[in-house]
């Protein structure tokens, strides 16, 4: 069970039970839909961007504990960051969960490091990255829904 | 059916015939409960495939040499076995296909397409697998025919009355599952085919989930077509059977063109081979067909009724023990079910359930089971599904239940 506890840490279970910034945004400056057809996860990420900075970010949707916790943590982390910083965090996070971090320490990712265990569960990587891909799509102004497949 | 505590056969010795079952995963003994997706293969079927690949490997129907003669004999013998398995009038009514999906597509394009146009309907039910929905939508796009759906009831059943009501004069063809892959519901197929016959509407039964659990007699069932997949009846993947009444198969145009399906070819035109070869263009999955024949032979020797009695006992026991877990809801509560137990747990997504069970060595399926409309009916994105085969044990149900209980504790709102 020890490796399972690496994946389902208390922090993750807490974010799953009570996700942060789990709400619609009435007038976002950008938003995008994401879908994981494999498990049916769907979510919408909303952004309020002002002067190249994430003033507010939120999400709604349904999904597994990993995807919900990842989305919740993501909103906590990117709020107040510049778009350049968001891209950097995304790169670092993506590297960590896919196990391709190239030596970058998860410590530099702050609270996102609790998702490091995902790299040991290859079939669950897409659950952890769905929210991030959807966020990036919203930033790029992509109108087609993001699909993990 | 009265509950039985043990099967009418030696479980340990049966299990030893399935090489995959003896392994451990993550240092736990494998508990394989994903049989509705793919069942394991007995050594007898694996050996038959190996014998083809190591001794008889060659092409069929056209060789003059010893290997080709042997390969052809075994391939055609597998067809004879398949026809016995479903009690067909003749082996020529059994077409080798890739699986149930290909069988439905073949019937859609070869049999139904010339019969439909704008304003016509094709009738299916609310519990169908995507493979019995999407081919009809594609046909509809090409012809203007409409898809009509008999509603799913909240217990996961299809009512005969609803079906009768839906059989309006615009319906040209009906296609429905024998057993639901997502819910386990056994459809009253005999009553449904009788209604179709009354109105002269031809129909197909998707038997993918029924073939391993229910003795199939196509003469008694009264459908025009019956389809099933090899890998769900302990055979290889990529091979299956489409049974069709000879008079239909003979009248139908070929679906795919190529070698083997022709009688003669010239640039001015070609003529078609006799059935079933008319529908087997190109070199088929010869090893798969031979493996399927061996698996069906094995299953018939074993006895489906004997297997079904034990599988019912497993399903009932699993339903009972999982039913006591707080926050767990069973999806699909039809009075008659076969082989499948779908469930959801409050606060725990099926995908998380699947991952946690996996680490305990328990293999189940998590997802929408290629039946998104069924999920939508129940207002859920997905379910966790345990599905049973003749080699499963009561101890495995206990392992499943213990593992599910841990999930519930982990995800409970504390």
Image (tube, rainbow, N blue to C red):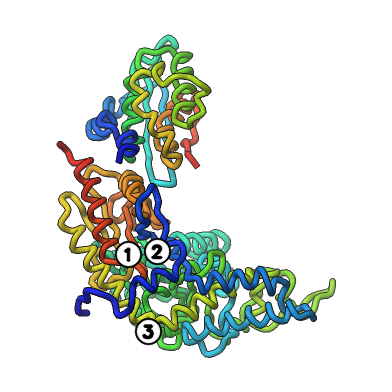
Q: Position of residue B295 (x, y in %)?
A: 50, 75
Residues at marks 3 and 2 touching, judged by CB atoms closer than 8 Å: no
Chain ID, mark 1: B
Classify B356 as above or below B196. Answer: above
Say which residue appears at 25% left-offset and 31% top-offset: A10
Chain designation of label 3: B
Q: Residue A82 sits in which quadrant?
A: top left
Reading the image, the residue beneath label 2 is B36
- Quarter containing the N terminus of chain B: bottom left
Relative to B320, is B382 on the left or the right? right
Q: Which mark is residue B194?
A: 3
In the displayed structure, does residue B279 sit left or right of residue B130? right
- Image quarter hosting the C terminus of chain B: top left
Residue at image coords 51%, 74%: B44
- Percent position of residue B17, x then y: 44, 71
Chain label for disc 2: B
Distance from the alpha carbon under mark 2 to that under mark 1: 7 Å
Numbered tag placed on residue B340 in the rendering: 1
């Amino acid at each position: 069970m020890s490796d399972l506890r690496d994946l389902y840490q208390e922090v993750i279970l807490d974010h799953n039970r009570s996700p942060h910034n789990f709400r619609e945004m009435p007038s976002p400056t950008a938003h995008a839909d994401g879908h994981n057809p494999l498990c049916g996860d769907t979510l919408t990420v909303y952004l309020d961007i002002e002067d190249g900075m994430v003033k507010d970010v939120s999400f709604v949707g349904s999904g597994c504990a990993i995807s919900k916790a990842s989305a919740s943590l993501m909103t906590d982390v990117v709020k107040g960051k510049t778009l350049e910083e968001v891209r950097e965090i995304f790169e670092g996070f993506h590297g960590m969960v896919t196990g391709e971090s190239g030596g970058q320490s998860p410590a530099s990712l702050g609270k996102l490091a609790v998702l490091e265990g995902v790299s040991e569960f290859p079939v669950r990587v897409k659950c952890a990255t769905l929210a991030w891909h959807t966020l990036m799509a919203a930033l790029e102004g992509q109108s087609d829904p993001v699909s993990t497949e | 059916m009265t509950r039985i505590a043990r099967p009418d056969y030696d479980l340990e010795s049966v299990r030893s015939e399935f090489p995959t079952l003896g392994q451990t995963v993550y240092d736990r003994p494998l508990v394989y409960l994903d049989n509705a997706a793919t069942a394991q293969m007995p050594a007898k079927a694996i050996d038959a495939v190996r014998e083809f690949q190591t001794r008889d490997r060659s092409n069929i129907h056209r060789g003059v040499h010893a290997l080709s003669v042997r390969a052809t004999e075994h391939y055609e013998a597998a067809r004879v076995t398949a026809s016995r398995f479903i009690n067909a009038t003749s082996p020529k009514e059994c077409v080798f296909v890739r699986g149930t999906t290909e069988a439905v597509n073949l019937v859609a394009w070869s049999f139904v397409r010339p019969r439909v146009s704008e304003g016509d309907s094709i009738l299916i039910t609310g519990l169908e697998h995507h493979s019995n929905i999407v081919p009809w939508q594609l046909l509809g796009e090409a012809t203007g025919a409409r898809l009509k759906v008999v509603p799913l009831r909240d217990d996961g059943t299809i009512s005969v009355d609803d079906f009768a009501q839906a059989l309006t004069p615009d319906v040209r063809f009906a296609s429905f599952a024998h057993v639901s892959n997502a819910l386990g519901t056994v459809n009253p197929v005999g009553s449904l085919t009788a209604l179709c016959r009354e109105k002269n509407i031809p129909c197909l039964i998707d038997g993918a989930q029924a073939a391993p659990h229910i003795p199939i007699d196509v003469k008694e069932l009264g459908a025009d077509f019956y389809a099933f997949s090899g890998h769900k009846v302990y055979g290889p993947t990529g091979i299956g059977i489409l049974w069709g009444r000879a008079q239909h198969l003979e009248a139908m145009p070929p679906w795919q063109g190529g070698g083997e399906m022709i009688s003669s070819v010239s640039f001015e035109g070609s003529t078609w081979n006799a059935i079933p070869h008319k529908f087997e263009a190109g070199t088929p999955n010869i090893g798969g067909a031979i493996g399927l024949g061996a698996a069906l032979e094995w299953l018939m020797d074993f006895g489906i009724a004997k297997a079904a009695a034990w599988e019912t006992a497993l399903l009932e026991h699993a339903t009972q023990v999982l039913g006591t877990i707080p926050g767990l809801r069973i999806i699909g509560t039809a009075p008659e079910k076969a082989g499948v137990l779908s469930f959801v747990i409050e606060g725990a997504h099926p995908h998380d359930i699947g991952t946690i069970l996996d680490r305990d060595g328990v293999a189940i399926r998590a997802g929408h089971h290629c039946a998104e409309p069924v999920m939508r009916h129940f207002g859920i994105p997905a379910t966790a599904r345990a599905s049973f085969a003749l080699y499963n044990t009561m101890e495995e149900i206990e392992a499943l239940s213990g593992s599910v209980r841990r999930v519930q504790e982990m995800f409970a709102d504390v």
